[in-house]
Amino acid sequence: MTTLKFTERMAGHCVRFDQNLVPTKNREFQDLVEDGYREDFEFTLTIDIKDVESFIADPNCQATASGNIVSNIFKGSCEITDGVFNLFVRPSISQDLNTAKEMHYLLHFNDSAGQPNTFYGYKNIEKEDALESWQETTTLYFYIFRGHLQKSDFNNSRPTHVGMLFISVADFLKQLASFEASDNENLFESEAFLSFIKFFSKNLWEAHAPFFFGTTAERWNDHRYPVNTTLGVLQGTKELIPIDTEDNLTISLQRFKALDSQKVVLLVHGLAVSTDIFILPEINNLVNHLHQNGFTDVWSLDWRGSSRFVYNLAPHKFTLDHVAKYDIPAAVNYIRKTLGERVEINIICHCLGSVSVMSSIAAGYTTGVSKIVSNSVSLNPKTGTIAFLKLLIGPFLFQNIFGYPYISPQMPYFSGFRFGKWIYWISRIFRWECREPSCHMLSIMWGWGYPVAYKHENMHTTTHRRLHDLFGGTSFHYYRHIRKMISRGKSVSYSDNPKEVDYFEEMKSKKDVAILLTSGAENLIFPGSNKETYHRLKDHLPKIKYFELPGYGHQDVFMGKRAHLDYYPTLVRFLKTGDHLCK
């Protein structure tokens, strides 16, 4: 076991924090320090790595930090009683979607009056930002809290001060000269020191090197949570149930049961996603919210368009007619067979899953549903002009000219330069809203916007970094069906053999089903679609209602970090009362 230690001095400024919004982004720290009454602040730390091999192998492995903090805020020099240092860990504080790695400092100290305090600071390394490497590795953003806290305590605490520290060139040279390794007196012959420098350089390369140069393996295997995990469901039992449809395809139901109930909710996702969007561990997800509000038996359908099924990555002739005729009835019938004919089934559905549910109800393939929440689009799909042009030429171009069997947000992670990676790089020429490859690919696959599927500010940082796990590929036939619906201005069957089914007209007679149509006000995939459906059906269906969520787009109503506050309560009110408005 070899040890390595070095001394680091950083100096800057600190300001008293008395605002409501705690800073989480670099720019917010900079604004606070520039605008507030600044006090000088510095620390001198000795970083002691007890086992270099373990420290390099495990990103969660910590080095000890000792030394002192000096500031007039604390009446002089304060000795650090307990300190830890993490190098190149996954981001946990920064809400900057482009942050690739962070360095963390957690220091406990007592001020001159003997009061305990905690210093927590981070340096953030942004993706593909090599020109800022010096600034990123020498700038520290920090908080001061009362008491000796751990990271898990920060969400329930407010900082008393915030600030920024910097390493000068002179201090950086002193830091390099301070390195000591236990395995060799000559530092440049020390394996511990050379391993540390190699590790440091490798992480900078992975963060800064353009994606084009191929850190593919690391990014492809960078899973924040296990793929398709159910860790996000906090209560009850979890059951995965395969179901065979009448047209000989296997789909699946997942059941999340906290308590037995004769009032169940069935969740239906959109195309190329899965049950995952309802059970994200990093947010207060929809399944947990339903459990907490009296809906203790929740089911989720992975229909044939789910990202979990590999047959979506091969050419096929499935349309939304197949989903409406086979998948939705199979799920509803299974629940009714399991729980009995008297069970009350309510459905919350999204995107093309919503089109399929509403079409299935309209055509009479699915019966006996009590209430339906349909998000984003249902029986009158609409897109913008540019998005429709993509629908006109995209399927033919990609399938017949380029020879791609499918398109996927995961394409930029594939090795080599041919299969799909070039699409991402063309997008990057024109789009700089973020540096997440999957985010760019989603905007290419759907609608038109920057980004198209959600508003960036609504997304949890972890969710944004999990996009390549949460969204999958799809072949192009579903696009053709949507194109026909948009051309006709309403939901109709893809085939007219033996007769075209007009789902929109058929729905006019379904007066017993309570329906809540919802949409984010800034939905860029199907803008205004559900509002139009509401206005065209409200004179025919006495139980239809419409709700529009300000500040949200298409996908973030379910996947957004504040959806449990802004959107889910509306769904619960409707499922309980048949109305979505507060009384």
Image (cartoon, rainbow, N blue to C red):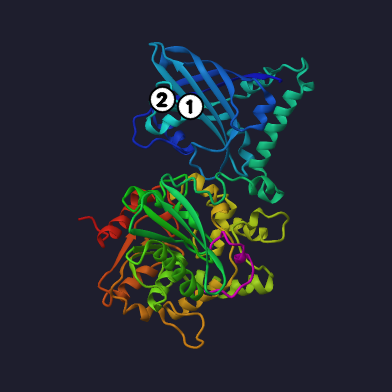
The residue sitting at 38% across, 73% down in the picture is 361
Q: From the top left corner, tell me how far across and down residue 312 is, in percent.
A: 59, 66
Q: Is residue 317 magenta?
A: yes
Between 308 and 433, the one lying in front of the other is: 308
Q: Which residue is mark 2?
A: 145
The residue sitting at 40% across, 26% down in the picture is 161
In the displayed structure, 559 sits above or below 243; it is above
Residue pushed farthest bottom? 498
Label 1 packing within 10 angstroms: few (<14), some (14-19), many (20+): many
In the displayed structure, 50 sits above or below 246; it is above
Given the image, on which type of amino acid does mark 1 rest?
Tyr
Q: Secondary structure at mark 2?
A: strand
The residue sitting at 50% across, 38% down in the picture is 94
Figure quadrant of the N terminus: top right
Corner quadrant of residue 422: bottom right
The span shown in magenta is: 306-320
Between 21 and 154, the one lying in front of the other is: 154
Given the image, on which type of amino acid does mark 2 rest?
Phe
Between 498 and 405, the one lying in front of the other is: 498
On the rendered structure, is 260 left or right of 202? left
Q: Is residue 481 magenta?
A: no
How many marks overall? Answer: 2
Q: Secondary structure at mark 1?
A: strand
On the rendered structure, is 420 left or right of 236? right
In the displayed structure, 282 sits above or below 29; it is below
* Mark 1 and mark 2: Cα distance apart in space: 8 Å
Earlier in the chain: of badge 1 and badge 2, it is 1
Q: Which residue is mark 1?
A: 120
Figure quadrant of the C terminus: bottom left
Q: From the top left corner, tell me how far across and down residue 66 is, in percent.
A: 55, 16
Q: Are marks 1 and 2 in contact (CB under 8 Å)?
A: yes
Q: From the top left corner, tell me how far across and down residue 71 is, in percent.
A: 45, 17
